[in-house]
Amino acid sequence: MTASAPPTRYGRVIRASIDRFSAECFARDGAPPLGLLVAVEDMEEPVFAVVCGVLTEGIDPTRRVTARGEPEHDLQRVLDENPHVPALLATTFDAVVVGHKRAGNVCQYLPSAPAPMLARVRGCTDDECAAFMRSFDFLRLLLAGGVFADDVIASALRQAAAAQPDRRGFLVHSGKALTPLLADDATRLQAILRRIQP
Amino acid sequence: MNGHGTDGRPVLSLVELDRPQIFSSLGSVVGGSLTGGLEVRLDGEVDVEEMAAGRYVTVEARDQLFFGMITDVELKTTLPALTETPPGEDDEFLREVYRGTAAFAVLHITPMLRVSAIENNAPEPVKTVPGHFSRVREATQAEVERIFGEEDAEHFVIGTPLDMEVKVRLDYERFVERSNGIFGKSGTGKTFLTRLVLLNVIQKSNAQREAKKKAVHLVFDMHNEYGWEGSYEGAGGTVKGLKQLVPSSVVVYTLDEDSSRRRRVKYDSAVTIGHNEIDAEDIALLAETLNLTQNSVDACHALQARFRDGWLKQALDLSMDEDSDDTPLLNQLAIHVATVRNLQRGLNKLLRNKPFLVERAPAASLNAILGSLLAGKSVVIEFGRFGNDLDSYMLVANVLTRRIHEKYRDLVEKALGEKGEKPIRLMITIEEAHKFLDPRVAGQTIFGQIAREMRKYNVTLLVIDQRPSAIESEVMSQLGTRVSCLLDNERDVDAVLSGVSGKSGLREVLARLDSKQQALILGHAVPMPIVVRPETYGPENYERWVEGFGERSRSRASDLYPDE
């Protein structure tokens, strides 16, 4: 890792299955962006995942957050009048596991065990991103990643492209990788391609 | 796979070490059959527009290389929806993504030859297909060169393949041992090709040491294109004929001395044909053009049986009166007066205004021609203005060929009996060949006979035609090597390709030749069908051809140019 700036740490794993995990953010407003490639630390070799959802809610499931303030009060005023509310909130994010490192190599398939509980989750470095995006086999895992999979894929590819020297070439290449995966669903393919169109 | 010897395997000699190692890879074999040809999925990065039917490719199978020709290019898609809603004009990104993935091209390849990648064997015809996913690349120049042989005493250059700088060569020996055909619509370059073939055969024949390998031409030169000089659309308007390039091997005879003199053509002798040399069979061939009834043709045969070689004169002298001195004769031969009328009208039409037809010709003409041929000289018979008259052309060609063939038959049989030398091989060139080889007349004419009996009597044909479909199919099937310029009539294309494996693919190639200077060659004298740009027959190559012929002929050639 030769990163100029250390990668941002976003949270800790609080729920983990073999194909996805949830992590609670260190800061309530410190959630990673949708589609970001993240790595689970505190393991010998990291597990890679793509952020596929963010949720902010009350800490106590028995006490719902209620809508305070009058209709003409803006957000800032409501927060000023209810300073305790943010302290009652927590933000979690979900991530779809898209691969892991094994003997130093990036493997774009599921690891043999889920991410450890309470392990830290950080954003990937540019080098890790570049190494990971050399192959697009992970797209198959993402495609099965839930209702918003299309948007997740599109944002993941857009973010990865931004770090590439040939942004357009990267997007074309990824589109080509996506095409056979969606050979039976041209509408969906077209929808994703339109989202990543430079 | 290319066997460059690093693992101790013998180096594949087809792939020379000193040539560039960058092959342009095209794609992988994904399906197909031996009879239907291979399907090759084009790689995404290869531009389909760069492909061309008729181009050669090499398929690298596990232990052997296959050579084949691109016969078709097909666009396919894996997403049916794309055919209904293709990316719009400004959707360059989508187009780029789909290109080579959802939308791709398939090459159809007809495999033709294979060669072992391990042993250094000669290429052999394919009997199987390369396995799935064998890599396909453009054939390299070295490979094509190897397949079509080096230029030596046995091979002559006919042209260059499309997009390559190598030479394609015909096997002289195989070319002259069978009848051959040159086809193409009018204006596609048949005449130039023919001139090239004639000249090269003469040169290669001269280069042969053994007498039995030599060959001579007898050219019935309808439009005066081959003997002294030929017409040319480019600068100068004329090109040198055979006589100017290889003077010591060619004798030019003319039927029309006036025309030859007017055109300032050097000819060696004039040809005359006596009425006594014309057979009933010759007249039968012309029945259609002379408007003769079948009865008239029968009458010719009857008259000939009775009067031998004086029959034509008798036929012309027959009285048409109902009750004349000839009536008993006509009754005896069962010839009706109306038939006599029809016959005489036809014969008079044939004999009118033809100074080369004389009542009794000295046998000298025929003997001189035969003498020249047997002495190893090719003979070109110029028709002068009579070339435009099909009757004359067919009559003369038929009469002379029949006589010469008879003589050849005698000589060959004699040679067989006495275990002597057969006469020199003779290749007879006829134009408008379908007139002689039409299914209705091919059974009767000497040309049909020559084509069918093949090389038995050392006489073969070089047929030149623009309507091969009108030639009897049995004759077509006997043609060893076929050279075809563009043909667009489907039946003609079928006729040229009859009896050829991989026909459906070649049909596309043939129908898509450029209208000029491209020809498909297939058959006996080439290892596999190939599309070539024929050698230029023009001033830039004269020197080379004359040079190949030795100092002596060069000096004689220059003697023949009083103007220069």
Image (cartoon, grey):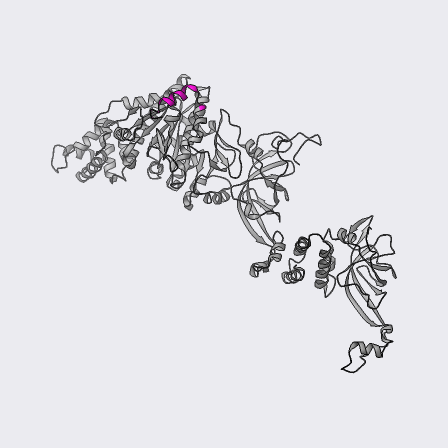
Seen from the viewer's position, the closer of residues B117 and A91 is A91
| Place of residue B285 in the rendered image (x, y in percent of width and height, measured from the top left) | 29, 36
The answer, for residue B339, to whether it is visible in the render is yes
Which quadrant: the N terminus of chain B? top right
| Place of residue B393 in the rendered image (x, y in percent of width and height, measured from the top left) | 30, 34
Seen from the viewer's position, the closer of residues B120 and A197 is A197
| Place of residue A156 in the rendered image (x, y in percent of width and height, measured from the top left) | 73, 59
Q: In which quarter of the image is residue B420?
A: top left
Q: In which quarter of the image is residue A71?
A: bottom right
In the image, residue B19 above or below residue B39: above
Residue drawn at x 56%, y 51% as measured from the top left: B75
Which quadrant: the C terminus of chain B? top left
The stretch drawn in magenta includes residue B53? no
Q: In which quarter of the image is residue B298?
A: top left
| Place of residue B514 in the rendered image (x, y in percent of width and height, measured from the top left) | 45, 43
Seen from the viewer's position, the closer of residues A113 and B292 is A113
The answer, for residue A64, to whether it is visible in the render is no
The stretch drawn in magenta includes residue B554? yes
Report the magenta residues as a range.
B547-564
Seen from the viewer's position, the closer of residues A119 and B419 is A119
Residue drawn at x 44%, y 20% as measured from the top left: B550
The mark total stands at 0
